[in-house]
Image (cartoon, rainbow, N blue to C red):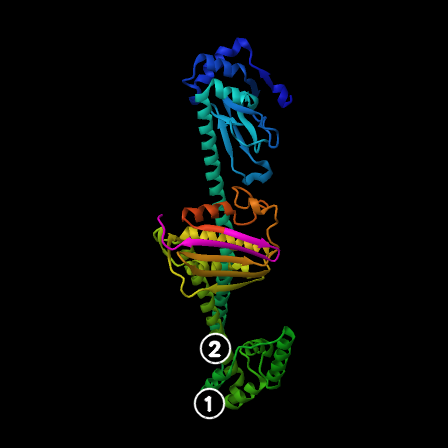
Amino acid sequence: MSYAERISPVAPSNLLALVDEVRKIAVFTDLSQEQLEWFVSNCQEARFATGEIVYKEGTPAEYMSIFLEGRIFARREAEGADSPVFIAEKGDVTGLLPFSRMTHLTITGRAEEPVHLLLFPATLFQEMFQRMPALGKRLVGLLTDRVREVTRSEQQRDKLAALGKLSAGLAHELNNPAAAAARASDALLECLARLRRLDALPYLSEANCTAIAKLEGELRSELQPPAFKDQLERSDREESITNWLESHNVPEAWKLSPLLVDANLTRDHLERYLVAAGPTLPTALMRFATLLEMERIVGQVAHSTKRISTLVKAIKEYSYMDQSPVQEVDIVRGIETTLAIMEHKLKKGIVVTREFSPDVPKVTANGGELNQIWTNLIDNAADAMKEKGKLRVRVTHEGDYVLVEVIDNGSGIPDDVQPHIFEPFFTTKGVGDGTGLGLDSVQRIVRKMRGTINFDSVPGETRFQVRIPIHQSM
């Protein structure tokens, strides 16, 4: 049975019973019998079984729906399973409400249990206002509440999407140094095991120890980190070292040579070491190479843990954890923190230029909300450049304001898109792309702070300008 076949006029014999049912719904309770009879008599009745489609996304919006029985679950099927769920049930008034700009249904709703609806046609809204002015005002209030609820839901969803993207990027950034530190700890354990094995081998005389200690001190001061132009050059060095070791009867030369190359030891260094170590060369050289490797590994651990610490600090600063929402905020520091948080995206091929004036004052603001602004503008710029280009971030003191400019050399914002970029829910990105925060959210934050945001865009340069008052009434 088609949707149209499910709709039928209200039977006169059933009119009074339906009026009694409608009167139980809050917005209709105190309306007169005459008004309710007119309203119900102009409705259509519709019934749906469990599982059937009550609303179909994309079909014309022609009726206001009054739920007498049942319950539906609805979502935007075009957005998939992650789309927010809308629920309507007995006692709800929904569908096309007066003054709504909806022309087509934006959701698909299925009956969770048998549904009984009254459908009031939009073509009679004007007459309804004349006959039932109190109902008109209440329905406008319902529309306002619905818009507010949808907006709040979308904002919450957008924030979660933004948090998810940032979290994924941070997880990747944290995983790299954490994995490096884990590998380094395993390598250190291997080095310690190697040193223990060396203790069981013939060792050095007192004279050898003195000479070798002196030589090792000299070598440590001379050695620089290796800088091979390519892997072939490294392989050639490794082969040369292996040949030298084998010519001096050093066992397992193929294991020792990579350690010596990593330490940047040359054949000249080895000749000097041979003079000091004499017949104990294999044991002494393995011990020295192992100690050099351990020093290098400790450096890697220090670098990795420092990177982790830097990211954790950036996260705390970005979210203003354990701090008052409104305080004196250093915008330059906030932007630096945001750039650190977004490094996973920028480092792929974007060159960031910072132009920070030395006299930028602090502003009284919500630091977390300011960081939402910078995140959205920088993320949009990165997307516009396809994650490869030049990003300029400029901060300066301009009268009673701090001016922040985010400038990219991407393709620019098309002329037909520019009038709409601050509209709620407007996006040029696919589902799941971008931070989801939206420029409308950015604009609302800026306005709440009594600031301004504007932009200028041509192919090759898009410039967003945000002015935040230094002192403001929050």
Q: Amino acid at mark 2?
A: Leu
Q: Is residue 62 magenta?
A: no
Of the 4 image quadrants, the one containing the N terminus is top right
Res. 374 visible in picture:
no
Instruction: Say how many tags the image has.
Output: 2
- Could you give the CA–CA distance between mark 2 and mark 1, rounded to whole angstroms? 17 Å
The residue at the point 49 percent across, 21 percent down is 129
Q: Nearer the viewer, residue 200 or 453?
A: 453
Q: Is residue 457 magenta?
A: yes
Q: Secondary structure at mark 1?
A: helix
Q: Is residue 41 left or right of residue 449?
A: right
Q: Is residue 33 above or below residue 470?
A: above
Q: Amino acid at mark 1?
A: Ala
Q: Nearer the viewer, residue 68 or 266?
A: 68
Q: How far across and down, in percent of the image, does residue 306 sit? A: 44, 65
Task: Give the magenta range.
Answer: 454-474
Which residue lies under the disc numbered 1? 211
Q: Is residue 170 above or below residue 357?
A: above
